[in-house]
Image: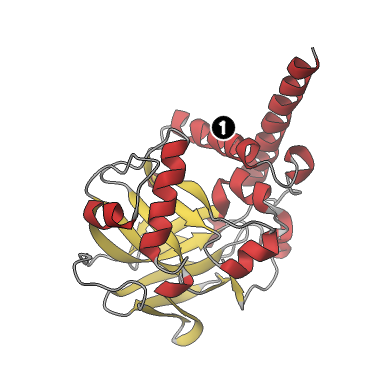
Amino acid sequence: MTGIQDSDAAADAVRAADERLRRAAESGRPCAPVRDLLGETDQDAAYAVQSLGIARRLDEGRRIVGRKIGLTSPAVQTQLGVDSPDYGVLLDDMIFADREPIDLARFLQPRAEAEVAFVLGRDLDSPTTHVADVIRATEFVLPAIEVVDSRVAGWDIRITDTIADNASSGAVVLGTTPRRLDGFDLTALGMTLDREGRPVSTGSGAACLGSPVIAVAWLAREVARRGQPLRAGEVILSGALGPMVDATAGVYRARLDGLGEVRADFFGTASGAASGTSTEGAAA
C-alpha cells in the first residue's frame, strides 16, 4: 500500500509542478522554484514535468522541430550540483530567422547565448551513439543565438527546476548559411557575441563539453535511452560557447569563426523583467 501511496504522491507532485510553471508562462509572472515539489535531484520526475508541458503545447497545435542541450559548462554544472548536461524540446513557434524582429514580451527573464545548431540528415536512435555517428548523421550546421528563459523567479534554479521548465528554453535564432562538418574543427571554433557592436561574451567550441559534437552525442544517447530518439530533420542546439548575457532591446550579433554570423533583433520589454537579475559573466 505504501508503494501505491508514494506513487500517487509523486504523480501529484509532477502535476503540481507542471501547473505552477504553466501559470507562470501564461501570466508572465515568474513563479517559485519547483524543487520543493520534486526534490533537488530527481531528474526523472523533472523530465516527467517537462513532458507534460510539451504534450500540452502539442495539443494546442505546436510541432516538435528539435532539441536543445543545456548545462554544457562545467562551471554551471558545479553550481547546480550535477555532473552532466540536461535537455529540452524545441517547438515550431520557438524558431526565428536571422534578423527577424523578436518581441521580448513573449519572454519572462530572457538571456542570450551563442551556439552551434546541428541539422540532422539521419536518425540518431541508439543509446550507444558516438561522435562519428553524429558527424555522419549531420547534414549541416548553422550559427545560432539561443534565447534562454526561466519561468522561475530570479533564475533561482537547481537541476530539477530547469529540466522541468523545458531546460529553461525560450527561442532560437538560426543563421541562414549552412556549413558541412567535413574538415571543420568545432573544438577550435572561436565565438564573439556583441550587443550594439560592443562585445558582451566570448568563447569557443571547447567550452561546450570539449566540442559541440560531443554534446550532441551525449544528447542522442540520453534521449534514445528515454525512448525519444533524435530524428532526421531535427535542429539540435548543442550548448553555449560562452557566458550568457541579459537580453534587452537592441541588436545582438554572434560571430562564429568559419561558420559565419547570426543576428537577433530584440524590441520591447520582457514580461517578467522586474524579477530578473544581471547575468553577465555567468555561463549557461
> Where is residue 203 drawn, in percent x and y?
46, 79
221 is higher (above) or lower (below) than 246: above
108 is higher (above) or lower (below) than 47: below
87 is higher (above) or lower (below) than 229: below
Q: Is residue 94 visible?
A: no
Instruction: Specify whether 17 is left or right of 225.
Output: right
> Which residue: 64% across, 73% down?
279
> Which residue: 49% across, 61% down?
147
Instruction: Specify whether 147 is left or right of 125.
Output: right
Q: Is residue 16 visible?
A: yes
Query: Which is nearer the eye, 24 or 71?
Result: 71
- Mark 1 nearby-residue class (10 Å; few <14, some 14–19, many ≥20): some
> Which residue: 20% across, 72% down?
183
Specify the quadrant of the image occupied by residue 246: bottom right
Instruction: Specify whether 249 is left or right of 123.
Output: right
> Which residue: 51% across, 68% down?
112
Instruction: Specify whether 110 is left or right of 35.
Output: left
225 is higher (above) or lower (below) than 246: above
Query: Which is nearer the eye, 75 or 141?
Result: 75
Residue, disc 1 = 52
> Where is residue 132 drawn, in percent x and y?
28, 56
> Where is residue 104 drawn, in percent x and y?
53, 61
Query: Which SS class for mark 1?
Result: helix
What amino acid is found at the position of numbered circle 1 in the picture? Answer: Leu
Q: Quadrant of the N terminus?
A: top right
Query: Which is nearer the eye, 21 or 269?
Result: 21
Specify the quadrant of the image occupied by residue 264: bottom left
Query: Which is nearer the eye, 94 or 83?
Result: 83
Specify the quadrant of the image occupied by residue 51: top right
Q: Quadrant of the C terminus?
A: bottom right
